[in-house]
Image (cartoon, rainbow, N blue to C red):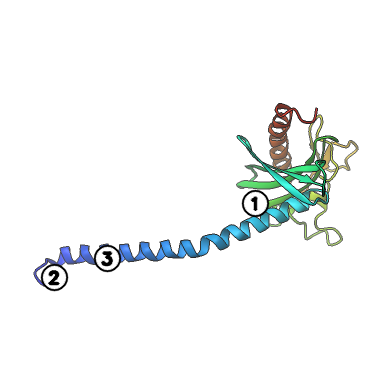
Amino acid sequence: MKNLSLSTRMILVLTLITIMSGAILAGWDLYTKPKVEYHREQALQAAIADVLPPYDHYDVLNTEQGYLYVGKEKDSTASVGLAFMAIGSGFQGEVRIMVGYDPDKRQLTGIKVLEQIETPGLGTKIVTDPSNKNDPLWWSAQFEGVAVEPEIVVIKNAKPVNDYEIQGITGATISSKAVVRIINDRLDVVQDLINQAGGHK
């Protein structure tokens, strides 16, 4: 190596460092990947349980339009409802929502916002509202039992009078409407999948 030029030696050293770094990162990925997958699966199961009525187990339907999770009663083919992921743009960025749906009643059974980067203290109230100390989850709780036809609607500065209406968050109307838009858009796709499968009419 003494006969090699300085630039050649530098290249060899950098190459060796790159190879070693790549090997370390690959090994670390192999070590952490199962743990990450396990925690992701646990979070998914918890979210499904949060938005569906009590169930014994759920079946996973892998469609071209994404996964549907169908909650089933014990020793029965009866469904308590299905859950699905709805993803779209909020005020600041992507919002990911787990949605529970009862196709027979044409109403939601619950929602849970899993990921969002909305404005702290305003848009983040779609997850939890610290200003409402008695019921910090009041906003998402409204979706339980809300009708999906003709479509879910956000109203401002008033209490809902129709079963398809949701009260918007004061100061975060855009985030409120974004969540409802994301859910409505995804519901259209999910209902088409149900109809194509010869399911609920």
Residue type at mark 3: give it.
Answer: Leu
Give the Cα distance between marks 3 and 1.
41 Å
**Distance from Cα at disc 3 to Cα at disc 2:** 14 Å
| Mark 2 Cα shell of 10 Å, populated few (<14), some (14-19), many (≥20) | few
Rendered view: 188 above or below 141:
above
Instruction: Tell me what residue is drawn at x 77 percent, y 49 percent.
Output: 51
Foreground: disc 2 or disc 1: 2
Do the CB atoms of the residues marked 2 and 1 lie less than 8 Å apart? no
What's the distance in space between the residues labelled 2 and 1, CA to CA?
Answer: 54 Å
Secondary structure under tag 2 reads loop
Residue, disc 3: 16
Crowdedness near tag 1: few (<14), some (14–19) or many (≥20) residues, C-alpha within 10 Å: many
Front one among 24 and 125 = 24
For residue 126, say whether it is visible: no
Categorize mark 3 by other alpha carbons within 10 Å: few (<14), some (14-19), many (20+).
Answer: few
Question: What residue is disc 2 on?
Answer: 1
Amino acid beneath label 1: Gln
Of badges 3 and 1, nearer the viewer stands 3
Please tell me which residue lies in front, 174 or 199: 199
Q: Give the residue drawn at x 84%, y 34%.
A: 104
Image-based side of 146 in relation to 26, left or right: right
Task: From the top left corner, tell me how far across and down residue 70 is, in percent.
Answer: 74, 43
Question: Nearer the N terminus, badge 2 or badge 1?
Answer: 2
**Mark 1 lies on residue:** 116
- Which badge, 3 or 1, comes first in the chain's sequence? 3
Quadrant in which residue 185 is drawn: top right
Give how far across and how far down residue 93 sits, in percent: 60, 47
Q: Is residue 2 left or right of residue 139?
A: left
Q: Which label sits on residue 22?
A: none
Q: Amino acid at mark 2?
A: Met
**What kind of element bears circle 3?**
helix
Counting residues from the start of the chain, the first of labels 3 and 2 encountered is: 2
